[in-house]
């Protein structure tokens, strides 16, 4: 069985009601999420066994976060209890020409203070086949970065497929070393590198030629240059994947992705998503769909890419971080049914 492992921070998400601004809000809607947890929930929802590795405080919020993951079928046995607090992020959902806004409150969280010697990666990776992480984890703190480094060395030793979503977050890289210096070593362990044009540019100075990401229209073929440059820098990498988001407005995005396998640039379907209910977790839902596809479609990269794009399209219609869709719903969209008719 294809057992997956993800490693990162789960947080409390507090969102303003509807499309209210922070200055208008007198209450917040609470749920839980975080990049690597979101991927784990997606994979579990598709029927794959998945373990989530993290650290949360030993208090009620930490326990609710764990119970939320368990409710979605995620194995939580490797989540540590400890640290001062659970990380929080606040979300103000944008509309039309007004962008969404995220504020982080996660300093000194349980995950930010995790240490390498507390995690038994050899035990965690026994029987596993896939390890996924994101650039958010090493951005949290030096100790989280060092724990990430040990995890990657162990995953390599156990011959797991390793994927990374670069997930550049400028607001998080504050502990000392610049992201390019840190990520160069960590990403060198990876078989699959996932990101978007901003991730590749901000982390490694790599950008697609002739692309204006603010125009609302993206030339997918230009991303072949990103794949070539990534593989030159990281010889272990076998696939470079770029998500393509055309931001017509905060309420209307085009959405697709491309995959470079060293010889061919594969194009996923393009969807016009309007109105967007919640785009947070959209990239994570794509990663979950892509991993599922690569594990279950016998290495068929085109089918896996298409599944990831369609799964993420559906996530934009669901509030909260998690992509709560089934394989059947994704397959239905892939068949061309975008009617949204009531299923009776």
Image: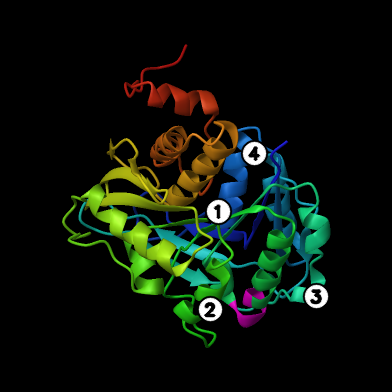
Q: Helix or strand or loop: what does disc 4 sit on?
A: helix
Q: Position of residue 62 (x, y in %)?
A: 72, 60
Q: Would you name the residue on which mark 4 appears?
A: 44
Check disc 2: other Cα within 10 Å, few if <14, some if 14-19, many if 20+. some
Dot 2 or dot 3: first in sequence order is 3
Residue at the image point whose x is 52% and y is 88% from the top: 176
Q: Helix or strand or loop: what does disc 2 sit on?
A: helix
Dot 1 or dot 2: first in sequence order is 1
Front of the two marks 2 and 3: 2
Dot 2 or dot 4: first in sequence order is 4
Check disc 1: other Cα within 10 Å, few if <14, some if 14-19, many if 20+. few
Check disc 4: other Cα within 10 Å, few if <14, some if 14-19, many if 20+. many
Q: Would you name the residue on which mark 1 appears?
A: 30
Distance from label 3 to label 1 (Cα)? 33 Å
Residue at the image point whose x is 29% and y is 59% from the top: 225
Residue farthest to the top, as pictured: 344
Q: Helix or strand or loop: what does disc 1 sit on?
A: strand
Distance from label 2 to label 3 (Cα)? 20 Å
Kindly check if marks 2 and 3 are in contact, taking CB atoms under 8 A apart as contact: no
Residue at the image point whose x is 68% and y is 61% from the top: 156
Q: Would you name the residue on which mark 3 appears?
A: 117
In the rendered image of this protein, does residue 135 appear above or below residue 93?
A: below
Distance from label 1 to label 4 (Cα)? 22 Å
Front of the two marks 3 and 1: 3
Residue 182 bears which disc, if any? 2
Front of the two marks 3 and 4: 3
Residue numbers of the magenta segment? 141-145
Q: Helix or strand or loop: what does disc 3 sit on?
A: helix
Check disc 3: other Cα within 10 Å, few if <14, some if 14-19, many if 20+. few
Front of the two marks 1 and 4: 4
């Amino acid at each position: 069985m294809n057992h997956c492992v993800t490693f990162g921070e789960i947080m409390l998400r507090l969102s303003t009601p509807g499309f209210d601004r922070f200055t208008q809000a007198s209450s917040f809607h609470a749920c839980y999420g975080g990049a690597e947890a979101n991927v784990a929930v997606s994979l579990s929802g598709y029927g794959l066994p998945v373990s989530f590795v993290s650290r949360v405080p030993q208090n009620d919020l930490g326990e609710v976060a764990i119970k939320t993951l368990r409710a979605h079928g995620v194995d939580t046995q490797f989540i540590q209890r400890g640290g001062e607090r659970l990380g929080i992020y606040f979300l103000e959902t944008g509309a039309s020409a007004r962008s969404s806004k995220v504020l982080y409150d996660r300093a000194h969280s349980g995950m930010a203070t995790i240490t390498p010697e507390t995690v038994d990666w050899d035990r965690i990776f026994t029987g596993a086949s896939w390890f996924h992480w994101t650039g958010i984890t090493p951005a949290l703190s030096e100790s989280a970065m060092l724990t990430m480094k040990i995890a990657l060395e162990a995953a390599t030793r156990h011959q797991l497929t390793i994927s990374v979503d670069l997930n550049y977050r400028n607001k998080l890289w504050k502990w000392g070393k610049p992201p390019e210096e840190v990520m160069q070593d960590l990403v060198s362990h990876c078989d699959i590198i996932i990101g978007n044009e901003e991730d590749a540019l901000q982390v490694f100075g790599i950008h697609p030629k002739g692309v204006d990401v603010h125009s609302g229209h993206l030339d997918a073929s230009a991303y072949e240059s990103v794949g070539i440059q990534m593989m030159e820098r990281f010889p272990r990498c076998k696939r470079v994947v770029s998500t393509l988001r055309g931001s017509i407005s905060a309420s209307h995005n085009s959405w697709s992705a491309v995959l470079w396998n060293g010889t061919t640039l594969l194009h996923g379907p393009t969807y016009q998503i309007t109105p967007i209910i919640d785009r947070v977790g959209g990239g994570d839902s794509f990663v979950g769909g892509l991993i599922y596809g690569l594990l279950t479609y016998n290495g068929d990269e085109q089918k896996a890419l298409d599944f990831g794009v369609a799964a993420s399209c559906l996530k934009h219609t669901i509030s909260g971080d998690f992509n709560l869709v089934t394989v059947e719903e994704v397959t239905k969209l892939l068949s061309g049914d975008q009617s949204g008719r009531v299923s009776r």
